[in-house]
């Protein structure tokens, strides 16, 4: 392991990429400590500690909501916009054609549309957060209105756009997804404080909670690592062909199909969606219309129910695993490429039968991957009634994201290292 780290550090392009990413993350964490004017961080901290909804929202924003910083929205608006466009590509033929047949130019236009839609979404979420904090007393009793409200929304929206730009710059360095890495950095940055609080407030009655958390952490790391590394190798044969005057023998290789092809994206999507109804309902709790206020309170109460929240979270993670894999895995294109290359799967005819076989195999793998991912996601929620600890809910979700993102970083870094070694031959 140490030898591999030393080798990575000796490769100048890879070393420069890593240093660049570290600098960008340092800039992100610096911005995370610049608060929006008019917000009382002390009162806000108390709200986050006693509210499951806001606690998860803080984790999802990378810890930036805690100080209500200029980047308090995190990359949530961009992720929401991505979900919207991925759904639209399934129902709007023009967008689907742009994604499938437009090549690099088509993907660039689709990404550009996603960025543009992220801006109004960020403005709406900024207003929602400010209204939520004001209604809950997080601004020290000060209701932000008029020009101050406009400036706060403008600053927070600009912060999200800036994080989107940083995320794309990090992604271009080829050592991981920039948005996921920023979420990872935000989560890790909150751990020292959690550890300090646990030490200061520790008493013998919490021993069982700590043991349960450690067991959950180990199980989560092992299972997520197993799922991320699990691959189903589909055998592929290449027919013999002529190379000039020579007849080249056929080659047998394999097509790797990952059990968890979607990675950590389903978790991020599920958190975004499961938090949305509660956030919207918060705006109408004090509505003048009685039935609207009652309905909003019922929605909040419903999502505070552990069983309903856990089942919703499970279903969303399970469903998004299938959905996102369906977006990035196209058996029709894969079967077409194999046929063009003169390759075939033993016992399966080229064309439509190959497409059907790949789709069936991937669905079987997804059943395993989606179930494991959903179970690990809701395991901390299921354990909360036993331990009575809110920290385990947040900590388990965070740990799941940390493990998956780190595995992706390691894999992409190793791929770059191998590519560099081949170039030197």
Image (cartoon, rainbow, N blue to C red):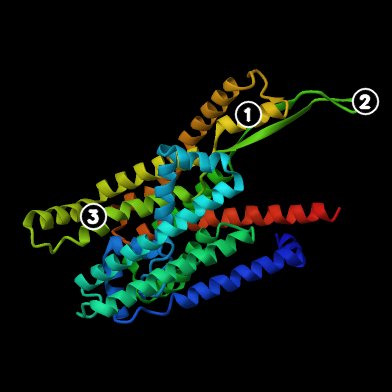
For the residue carrying disc 3, how many other residues have a C-alpha within 10 Å: few (<14), some (14-19), or many (20+)? some
Residue 179 in the image: x percent, y percent?
A: 50, 60
Residue to which mark 1 is pinned:
336
Residue to which mark 3 is pinned:
304
Instruction: Let me know if residue 245 appears in the view.
Output: yes
Kindly report the distance in space between the C-alpha atoms of the residues bearing marks 3 and 1.
Answer: 48 Å
Name the foreground residue: 236 vs 142.
142
First in sequence: mark 2 vs mark 1: 2
Q: Residue at x 65, y 71 (%)?
A: 19
Query: In front of the other: label 3 or label 1?
Result: 1
Outermost residue to the left: 290
Kindly report the distance in space between the C-alpha atoms of the residues bearing marks 2 and 1.
Answer: 28 Å
* Image side of residue 213 versus residue 243, left or right: left
Outermost residue to the front: 94
Kindly report the distance in space between the C-alpha atoms of the residues bearing marks 2 and 3.
Answer: 73 Å
Instruction: Let me know if residue 328 appears in the view.
Output: no
Work out which quarter of the rendered image holds the N terminus and state it: bottom right
Quarter holding residue 239: top right
Name the foreground residue: 186 vs 155.
155
Q: Which residue is drawn at 59% across and 59% down?
A: 171
Quarter holding residue 252: top right
């Amino acid at each position: 392991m140490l030898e591999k780290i030393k080798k990575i550090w000796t490769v100048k392009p890879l070393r420069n990429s890593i240093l660049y990413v570290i600098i960008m993350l340092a800039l992100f964490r610096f911005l995370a400590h610049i608060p929006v004017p008019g917000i009382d961080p002390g009162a806000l901290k108390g709200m986050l500690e006693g509210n499951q909804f806001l606690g998860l929202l803080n984790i999802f924003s990378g810890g930036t909501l805690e100080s209500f910083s200029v980047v308090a929205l995190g990359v949530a608006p961009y992720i929401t916009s991505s979900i919207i466009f991925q759904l639209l590509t399934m129902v709007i033929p023009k967008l689907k054609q742009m994604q499938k047949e437009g090549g690099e130019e088509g993907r660039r236009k689709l990404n550009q549309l996603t960025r543009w839609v992220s801006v109004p979404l960020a403005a709406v979420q900024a207003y929602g957060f400010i209204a939520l904090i004001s209604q809950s007393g997080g601004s020290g009793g000060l209701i932000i209105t008029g020009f101050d409200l406009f400036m706060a929304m403008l600053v927070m929206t600009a912060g999200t756009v800036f994080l989107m730009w940083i995320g794309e710059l990090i992604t271009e360095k080829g050592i991981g997804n920039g948005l996921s890495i920023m979420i990872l950095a935000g989560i890790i940055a909150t751990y020292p404080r959690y550890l300090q609080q646990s030490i200061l407030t520790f008493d013998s009655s919490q021993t069982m909670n700590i043991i349960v958390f450690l067991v959950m952490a180990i199980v989560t790391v092992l299972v997520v690592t197993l799922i991320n590394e699990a691959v189903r190798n589909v055998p592929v044969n290449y027919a013999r062909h002529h190379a000039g005057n020579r007849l080249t023998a056929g080659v047998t290789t394999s097509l790797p199909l990952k059990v968890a092809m979607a990675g950590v994206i389903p978790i991020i999507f599920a958190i975004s969606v499961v938090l949305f109804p509660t956030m919207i309902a918060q705006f109408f709790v004090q509505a003048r219309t009685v039935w609207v206020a009652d309905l909003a309170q019922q929605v909040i109460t419903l999502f505070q129910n552990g069983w309903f929240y856990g089942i919703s979270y499970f279903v969303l993670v399970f469903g998004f695993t299938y959905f996102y894999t369906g977006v990035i895995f196209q058996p029709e294109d894969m079967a077409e490429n194999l046929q063009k290359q003169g390759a075939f799967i033993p016992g399966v005819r080229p064309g439509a039968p190959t497409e059907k076989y790949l789709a069936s195999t991937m669905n079987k793998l997804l059943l395993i991957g989606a179930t494991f991912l959903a179970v690990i996601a809701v395991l901390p929620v299921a354990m909360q009634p036993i331990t009575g600890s809110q920290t385990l809910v947040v900590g388990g979700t965070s740990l799941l994201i940390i493990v998956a993102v780190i595995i992706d970083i390691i894999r992409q870094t190793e791929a770059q290292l191998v590519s560099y070694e081949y170039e030197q031959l």
